[in-house]
Amino acid sequence: MRGLVVGRFQPFHKGHLNVILDISKRVDELIIVVGSAEKSHTLENPFTAGERIEMIYETLKKYDLNYLIIPIKDIEYNSIWVSYLESLLPKFNIIYSGNPLVRVLFRERGYKVEKPIMFNRNEYSGKEIRRRMLNDEDWESLVPGEVVKIIKRVNGVERLKELAKDDY
Ligand code: NAD
């Protein structure tokens, strides 16, 4: 059985990692879709698809998992989003998502959708991590060590802070 997990992973954090490790026990293969692939360099979506793929790939290297990582652009057409994904991905049988829109869209197309167990959602959250980066608070403990290295290498915190400045 092939499972599907979709996320923006801005950035990839320990909550995402726990979900992937948990789901991988239940499927033969997992497709990890890096959504909103076209988005980067904004306060909500600071990292490029390539950077996010690297975060996931480097983190998962030490685990024996069977997975594919596929970046996919958003489309302004929710009602056909699932068939758009079907045309780009290998066949999948089950979707794991806590995102209400994702859950509704797949369920309406007849897919089995399961909600992953939430891991410390208050802290393991992209929004909270980006907030901490902007406020010089500890964000490093919320992401895997490999992600810390990638964010530092691409000057991700400085990028976010620059993007938050007013025009002058
Ligand atoms: P996300 O990175 O916030 O979350 C990814 C997954 O991880 C979700 O299922 C979420 O519930 C889970 N998660 C997050 N923190 C967790 C924690 N602490 N513990 C356990 N699970 C946790 O990404 P998202 O916003 O859900 O990504 C959905 C993607 O699908 C976006 O890129 C969105 O644009 C895309 N999308 C596109 C369209 C379209 O193009 N029309 C429509 C729907 C969705």
Image (cartoon, helix red, strand yellow):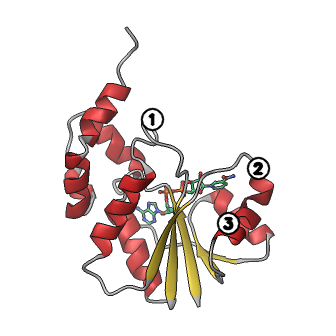
**Looking at numbered disc 1 in the image, what kind of residue is underneath it?**
Thr
Q: CB under 8 Å between callouts 1 and 2?
A: no
Q: Residue at x 28, y 68 (%)?
A: 58
Task: Name the outermost residue toward the top.
Answer: 168
Residue 119 seen in the figure = no
Q: Is mark 2 within 8 Å of ligand 1?
A: yes
Is residue 133 placed above or below 109 in the rendered structure? Answer: above
Of the numbered discs 3 and 1, the one sitting upstream in the chain is 1
- Image quadrant holding the C terminus, namely top left
Q: How far is mark 3 from mark 1, CA to CA?
A: 24 Å
Q: How far is mark 1 from mark 2, CA to CA?
A: 22 Å
x and y percentages locating residue 131 in the rendered image: 34, 38
Residue linked to disc 3: 85
Relative side of 151 to 82, left or right: left
Along the viewing direction, whichever of 83 and 136 lies nearer the viewer: 83
Residue linked to disc 1: 42
x and y percentages locating residue 64 in the rendered image: 32, 87
Q: How far is mark 3 from mark 2, CA to CA?
A: 12 Å
